Amino acid sequence: MALVNGRLGLSIAHQSSTVIQRHFSVTGACSAIQKLTRVRVVDNSALGNTPYHRPPKCIHVYNKNGVGKVGDTILLAIKGEKKKALIVGQKMPGPTMTPKFDSNNVVLIEDNGNPTGTRIKTPIPYLLRQKEGKFSKVLAIARNFV
Amino acid sequence: RRSGDAEPAKFKPPPKPVIVDRQRQTAERRFLSPEFIPPRGRTNPLKFLIERKDMIQRRKVFNIPEFYVGHILAVTTADPNANGKTSRFVGICIQRGGKGLGATFVLRNVIEDQGVEICYELYNPRIQEITVLKLEKRLDDNLMYLRDALPEYSTFDVNMKPQSYLDSEEVPVNKLQVRMKPKPWSKRWERPKYRIKGIKFELPEEKMKEAQKWNKPWLEFDMMREYDTSKIEEKIWKEVNEELKK
């Protein structure tokens, strides 16, 4: 601000600058998924793709510790509703040889484990295939695997 | 019979063959993989010797090609969960880290608008094949800024055909200046500590000048931080070559 005033002289001293930069720190999401993390829904369900003024956030992780990794179920708050979801990709680096995605990806799921959408375009890690029993239907609608 | 006196043609010697000494040419371009060079420290060199032995043993069985940061590689790994038991990933190498047997390299690609990065271990027995699809050095050693660059700079075709290169040619340097997404970035790449030459900064001049405040010009003259690896490299190069030829 001092630089601007010095260069442009006194005339602008009393006016506030047009560009008010408000820097608030947004934690660069480099950790796994926990309560209040904003996630990205990757299937083609209506609930996941209709725009809303608030991003879908995690409100509970079905885990002993409150941290969700790939393959864990979480409770999401989307469009004012509660919905279960499965984590399919995280920004946090995992064990070597496993993929790390640029966004926290999530697939919407019903209570019995059936996916809400019909297609998943984004790549899914092969790790999920280990838990075939619970998520076989989700894996069936997935197109690409990494 | 006298047929010889008709044409006493001048004897024309055959053209001299051009001998291209391939061995000497390839020996001129030495490449020692950076994980062989031991880090600076007071550990017993015996540890590095044993590790190098194991690394050479693995290299005899499995060919790890010469590659730098910026090359496009295709890696096939054995995966118990994948159908067909193997999984293939194509990507640009953005970082090579680690020394010894724990050496890793990170490959990045953008598939279906989703950026994916996989950190592979060079000496992991699960890796079945590493192919270099495109030889290309970049201006920096570390391309982590590709995460904050426009996704078009990280997209590579999964079914790319490997390009053929001569052994004797120099590795071409791609002087591409990458355009970035708007700030905020994961790291402040304009700061001089990262010494990045491969980004086209479209920031205003004041920001660039402000970034220079964090400049530490005395660091390059710091004698305590010097680590001259030329002699160590030569020794290790000889050792590795001799072992590999056996």
Image (cartoon, helix red, strand yellow):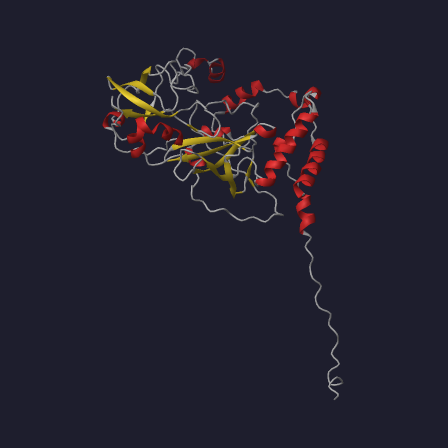
- Residue shown at the point (32%, 24%) measured from the top left: A86
Taking the image as shown, residue B140 lies to the left or right of residue A10, namely right
- Residue shown at the point (61%, 47%) measured from the top left: B169
Relative depth, front residue between B109 and A113: A113
Residue B39 x %, y %: 65, 25
Relative depth, front residue between B146 and B111: B111
Taking the image as shown, residue B207 lies to the left or right of residue A142, namely right
Q: Which part of the image, by quadrant, shows the N terminus of chain B?
A: bottom right
Residue B36 x %, y %: 64, 32
Residue extending farthest top: A14
Say whether residue B35 is visible.
Answer: yes
Residue extending farthest bottom: B1
Q: In which quarter of the image is residue A90?
A: top left
- How many numbered marks does the figure carry? 0
Residue B205 x %, y %: 50, 24
Residue B198 x %, y %: 53, 33
Say whether residue A42 is visible.
Answer: no
Relative depth, front residue between B180 and B6: B6
Q: Quadrant of residue B60?
A: top right
- Residue shown at the point (56%, 48%) measured from the top left: B165
- Residue shown at the point (49%, 36%) measured from the top left: B92
Q: Quadrant of residue B194?
A: top right
Q: Which part of the image, by quadrant, shows the C terminus of chain B?
A: top right
Taking the image as shown, residue B216 lies to the left or right of residue A5, namely right
